[in-house]
Amino acid sequence: GGAVINGKIAERRDFKYQVLLKLQNDEFSGVCSGAIIDEIHIVTAWHCVWDMEPNHIEVVVGSLEQTNDPNATSYGVSDRRLHESRSCNPGELRCYDIAILT
């Protein structure tokens, strides 16, 4: 299966700043997405990583699939910074659902 953007099969170059985050600890296994800010920083959603230690987060770059993409490169995470004012209660107009991974 390939990725689709605007009804057309997407090429890797079409989403070069997008990353896959693989999350796994003793209680949870899942995925989220993020975006490359620069060579060492990824921005993602606070709700994806708030309860994950950095060593339980894997950043996958260049993947069209969630598993076993031979063209993908994986990186570990050494630090996770969560927005200190995170507030996303139902009905709130403003939400600081942001985190930075290094």
Image: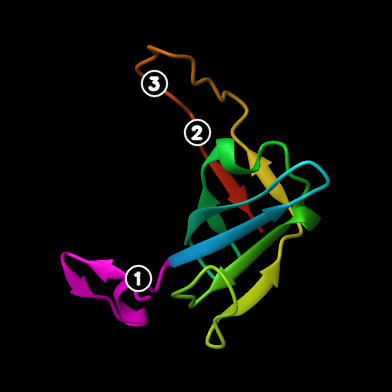
CB under 8 Å between discs 2 and 3: no
| Cα distance between the residues tagged 3 and 1 | 28 Å
Tell whether 80 sits left or right of 67: right
Foreground tag (3 vs 1): 1
In this view, which residue lies farthest toward the bottom?
Answer: 70
| Label placed on residue 28 | none
Q: Which residue is mark 1?
A: 15
Neighbor class of circle 3 (other Cα within 10 Å; few <14, some 14-19, many 20+) is few
| Cα distance between the residues tagged 1 and 2 | 22 Å
CB under 8 Å between discs 1 and 2: no
In this view, which residue lies farthest toward the front?
Answer: 1
Q: Which residue is mark 3?
A: 94
Magenta stretch in the rendered image: 1-17
Q: Which residue is mark 2?
A: 97
Which quadrant does the C terminus fall into?
bottom right
Q: Secondary structure at mark 1?
A: helix
- List x then y, in percent, for residue 77: 72, 61
- Amino acid on which disc 2 is placed: Asp
Which residue appears at 58% of the width and 72% of the height? 67
State yes or no: residue 14 in magenta.
yes
Which residue appears at 68% of the width and 71% of the height? 75
Which residue appears at 49% of the width and 15% of the height? 89
- Amino acid on which disc 3 is placed: Arg
Q: In the figure, 64 relative to 35: above or below?
A: below
Q: Secondary structure at mark 2?
A: loop
Q: Secondary structure at mark 3?
A: loop
Q: Nearer the viewer, residue 8 or 51?
A: 8
- Amino acid on which disc 1 is placed: Phe
- Which quadrant holds residue 40? bottom right
Q: In the figure, 86 relative to 72: above or below?
A: above
